[in-house]
Image (tube, helix red, strand yellow):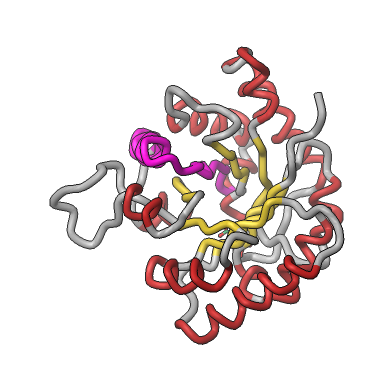
Amino acid sequence: MPSPRRLIAGNWKMNGLRSDATTRAAALRDKAGAARMALPDIVLCPPFTLLTTVAQTIGSTLALGAQDCHAADKGAHTGDIAAPMLAEIGCRYVIVGHSERRAAHGENDPQVRAKAEAAHRAGLVAIICVGESANERKAGRHLTVVAGQLDGSLPAGVNAANTVIAYEPVWAIGTGQTPMPSDIAEMHAYVRKRLSDALPKDDEGERIRLLYGGSANSGNAPELVATPGVDGLLVGGASLDAEAFWKMVLAAV
Ligand code: PEP
């Protein structure tokens, strides 16, 4: 089975005003446009307010993603954004189940699954995040925890074209700590096996891309993307620096 095409996604989180977003997106667009090699898929996930600005800046060279969506397609949900709204302004991806949303907004697996279903209905690729806490890893429960998150949050109809899984250990996000490569490889092999067992038809489970996320940066990216089972990266803090993010893209070429 050939390896899936790699994907590098930048989660800008709640950072940026129009001027710096435009500068960053334009820099990445120009680098991608000037590249003389086949690049991985590159996805920028700015805050909602900057989606249109970034869409207009990047054109079709890079892909646009959002950081969340509501499970409903429309309705009385003050402050929320629906997946069809994201699709309409040019998003192709949406992150769901990020640990910061699970922690700060109490999102649970059924809600994440409903959001992924909404993303699929709107024709978006759902980047579904899973990952254990520090205590869960210390207790040796990391595999069980991630298995539970996968079972609870993967919607029916999941396939390699509409879903990406991001393994993001909560304790590695924004902390400067990363798991040992062998620990990442263990988790990715475990997730891959579960997906392959659950989705044997047309090898869908083999082809779903598995990203690693958590304190990835331009220094550790080469080792992370070379780790067995890693098909790309979901990058938070380091994606705010166009030069650093571009180095990470190049590490995945
Ligand atoms: C993230 O928030 O998805 C993430 C991986 O953050 P960071 O790279 O900053 O750890």
Please state the horizontal and vertical placement of residue 209, each as a whole percent of the image: 66, 37
Q: Residue at x 37, y 41 (%)?
A: 122
Q: Measured along the vertical axis of the image, is residue 36 above or below residue 161?
A: below
- Residue 20 falls inside the magenta stretch: no
Number of numbered discs on residues: 0
Q: Measured along the vertical axis of the image, is residue 154 above or below residue 196?
A: below
Please state the horizontal and vertical placement of residue 125, each as a whole percent of the image: 51, 42
- Residue 128 falls inside the magenta stretch: yes
Please state the horizontal and vertical placement of residue 195, each as a whole percent of the image: 61, 23
Any part of residue 121 in sight: yes
Q: Residue at x 42, y 36 (%)?
A: 120
The residue furthest left is 76
Q: Dividing the image into four quarters, tell me where ligand 1 lies.
A: bottom right
Q: Residue at x 62, y 69 (%)?
A: 237
Q: Quadrant of the N terminus?
A: top right
Q: Measured along the vertical axis of the image, is residue 203 above or below residue 142?
A: above
Q: Measured along the vertical axis of the image, is residue 72 above or below residue 100?
A: above
From the viewer's perspective, tell me whether residue 233 is left or right of residue 228.
Answer: left
Any part of residue 173 in sight: no
From the viewer's perspective, tell me whether residue 136 is left or right of residue 69.
Answer: right
Viewer-nearest residue: 33 or 21: 33
- Figure quadrant of residue 145: top right
Highlighted magenta segment, given as a residue range: 109-134
Q: Residue at x 71, y 35 (%)?
A: 188
Please state the horizontal and vertical placement of residue 250, each as a whole percent of the image: 82, 61
